[in-house]
Image (tube, helix red, strand yellow):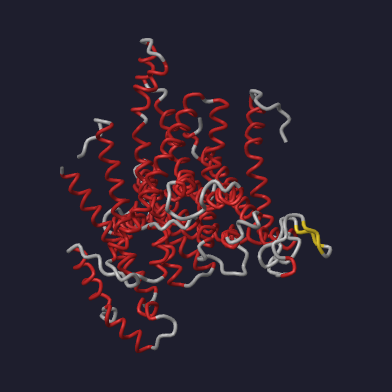
């Protein structure tokens, strides 16, 4: 950790590096913890997240019973809140990454195609993207989930279907800008095939802008997943998900404050950390934005 | 003039597209007749209801009939409430519009103030406010709603946690709404002010001895307004979607709540009415932003 007194003006490259580290350390720590919880929840969770115990319903923080410490208390079915929180991380991260990857690849391909073949097919794709954006996100998501039944894969499909236009628009704009560049003309003149032109010369330029959007979208997707589970449209019980934990806790808001406090805190911390990471990535990949 | 016509035609096409997509999705989602008939109904009862509602006709016939009615201003009859879909929608819109206007106003005031302070003073002020803005941006609005209920309703007993009877019950939902709207406004205000700062007109004004405060008020704010207006218009358009979770947390009887109910009951006329309204707002807000552009910046003209 940095030893510089707060407010001290950083001097030279070392100071700048130190300041950057100080700003980046908290998000990096939060993301590291979340990844650990997502990959090996069994090592971190003190007990089984699904084990109910009616004798231990709604116990407050730090309750000790039967050789067990319930650090964050228990819920309405006597389940350990900390363990559920840790297992819930996996749902959050898995859903968000799958949604961003799916929507990014589909939207990116759509935008690239639309930018390259501007008439006909391209125009049709972009009109579809614009139209999709005019439909309220939650309405479309709820409709898709009603159609396919609530489950985790369905939530991911709903998120992909509703968010691909975001990537398509970015990819489209970047492609339009890139294909006007001289090196593309040169490659075309040198006899590049259309496929080679797209994949070797244009794609590398749109990936960096898609990467920034994608990182920031991970945060948004975590929020959307939690919102859908909160409405009962995400992972189904008893699977622990932060959104459904908040929905369960809503009924006990007058008696057990910890049930709505900690899942929300975890959600907030992770979303904040990912957003900070996205902002950082943006300044690294897009030097024009640097102050 | 030609530009306005093209833009309006495009806007109409977007609304029509949205109606079509949702129409198809609703019909793929299941049989509304089965939901109206209830879980104990026989196949014969379900069939009778389907015939009554015209759901037994081929899909394209239903679609064309729906569009034909729509053109004459007939939004259809809600399957669930025994009322026209438009009446159902309008009775809820009142509540969402009230919440949207207070929430958006608060967000606008907060966003502009934060953005202005960040750009004007920099340093510690900027760092602290930026932390607040980034925090608010990452705050799940429905969680904030729950926390506000926990603090102000359950613990302090100051404000009601739900309902829509008095002005007091509007305070918590308004704060919740504003919390997710203001960060983007604060960021864009700061950024567009900072973008304008190195301009020549600022240097000229400074050189002729204009006081700093006056430069900010008379020149910078006006020139930085364009991007702010765009973001504000977009946010207004997203309001209906954003209202769903806030309205659920506070049991606010607005369009957001209606959306969840209507979709789950496959109440096609009501869902389509919501979609039409949302799409018109979205497209209209974008159009409005374009028009405001030319008012605020005479260099932008309609081609």
Q: Residue at x 51, y 32 (%)?
A: A290
Q: From the viewer's perspective, is residue B182 above or below residue A50? A: above
Question: Which x, y percent locates residue A230?
Answer: 53, 61
Quadrant containing the N terminus of chain B is top left
Question: Which x, y percent locates residue A79?
Answer: 70, 65
Looking at the rendering, which quadrant does residue B101 occupy? Answer: top left
Q: Residue at x 44, y 70 (%)?
A: A146
Residue A207 visible, this orientation: no
Compared across the picture, whether A226 is left or right of B19 comes to right
Q: Residue furthest left?
A: B1
Compared across the picture, whether B75 is left or right of A250 comes to left
Question: Which x, y percent locates residue B21?
Answer: 32, 65
Question: Which x, y percent locates residue A117?
Answer: 31, 55
Q: Nearer the viewer, residue B152 or B100?
A: B152
Looking at the rendering, which quadrant does residue A161 occupy? Answer: bottom left
Q: Nearer the viewer, residue A218 or B116?
A: B116
Residue A267 visible, this orientation: yes
Quadrant containing the C terminus of chain B is top left
Count of numbered circles on the image: 0
Compared across the picture, whether A30 is left or right of B153 comes to right
Q: Residue furthest right?
A: A67
Q: From the viewer's perspective, is residue B55 above or below residue A216? A: below
């Amino acid at each position: 950790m940095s030893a510089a007194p707060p407010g001290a003006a950083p001097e030279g490259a070392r100071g700048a590096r130190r300041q950057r580290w100080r700003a980046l350390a908290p998000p990096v720590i939060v993301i590291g913890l979340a990844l650990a919880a997502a990959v090996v929840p069994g090592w971190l969770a003190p007990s089984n997240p699904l084990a109910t115990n009616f004798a231990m319903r709604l116990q407050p923080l730090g309750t000790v019973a039967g050789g067990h410490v319930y650090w964050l208390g228990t819920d309405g079915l006597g389940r350990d809140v900390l363990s559920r929180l840790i297992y819930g991380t996996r749902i959050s991260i898995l859903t968000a990454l799958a949604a961003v990857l799916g929507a990014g690849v589909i939207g990116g391909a759509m935008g690239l195609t639309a930018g390259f073949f501007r008439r006909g097919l391209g125009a049709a794709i972009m009109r579809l993207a614009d139209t999709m954006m005019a439909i309220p996100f939650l309405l479309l998501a709820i409709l898709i989930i009603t159609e396919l039944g609530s489950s985790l894969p369905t939530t991911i499909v709903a998120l992909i279907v509703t968010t691909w236009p975001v990537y398509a628009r970015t990819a489209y704009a970047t492609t339009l800008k890139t294909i006007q560049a001289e090196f593309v003309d040169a490659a075309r003149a040198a006899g590049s095939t259309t496929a080679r032109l797209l994949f070797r010369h244009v794609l590398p330029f749109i990936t960096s802008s898609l990467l920034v959007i994608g990182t920031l979208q991970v945060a948004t997707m975590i929020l959307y997943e939690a919102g859908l589970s909160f409405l009962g449209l995400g992972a189904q019980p008893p699977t622990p998900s932060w959104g459904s934990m908040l929905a369960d806790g809503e009924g006990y808001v007058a008696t057990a404050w910890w049930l709505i406090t900690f899942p929300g805190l975890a959600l907030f911390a992770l979303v904040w950390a990912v957003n900070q990471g996205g902002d950082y990535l943006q300044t690294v990949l897009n030097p024009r934005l640097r102050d | 003039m030609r530009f306005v016509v093209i833009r309006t035609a495009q806007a109409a096409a977007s609304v029509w597209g949205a109606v079509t997509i949702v129409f198809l999705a609703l019909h793929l989602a299941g049989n509304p007749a089965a939901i109206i008939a209830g879980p104990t109904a026989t196949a014969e009862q379900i069939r009778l209801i389907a015939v009554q509602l015209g759901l037994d006709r081929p899909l394209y016939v239903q679609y064309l009939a729906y569009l034909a009615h729509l053109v004459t201003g007939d939004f259809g009859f809600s399957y669930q409430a025994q009322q026209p879909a438009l009446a159902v929608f309008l009775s809820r819109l009142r509540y969402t519009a009230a919440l949207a206007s207070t929430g958006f106003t608060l967000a606008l005031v907060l966003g502009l103030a934060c953005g202005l302070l960040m750009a004007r003073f920099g340093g510690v002020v900027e760092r602290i406010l930026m932390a607040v803005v980034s925090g608010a941006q990452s705050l799940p609005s429905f969680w904030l709603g729950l926390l506000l209920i926990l603090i102000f309703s359950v613990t302090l007993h100051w404000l009601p946690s739900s309902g829509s009877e008095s002005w007091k019950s509007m305070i918590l939902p308004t704060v919740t709404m504003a919390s997710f709207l203001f960060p983007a406004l604060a960021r864009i205000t700061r950024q567009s002010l900072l973008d304008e700062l190195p301009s020549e007109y600022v240097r000229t004004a400074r050189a002729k001895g204009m006081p700093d405060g006056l430069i900010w008020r008379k020149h910078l704010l006006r020139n930085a307004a364009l991007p702010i207006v765009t973001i504000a218009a977009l946010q207004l358009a997203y309001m209906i979607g954003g209202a769903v979770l806030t309205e659920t947390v506070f049991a606010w009887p607005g369009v957001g709540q209606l959306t969840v109910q209507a979709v789950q009951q496959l109440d096609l006329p009501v869902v389509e009415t919501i979609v039409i309204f949302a799409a018109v707002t979205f497209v209209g807000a974008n159009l409005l932003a374009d028009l405001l552009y030319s008012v605020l910046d005479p260099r932008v003209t309609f081609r």
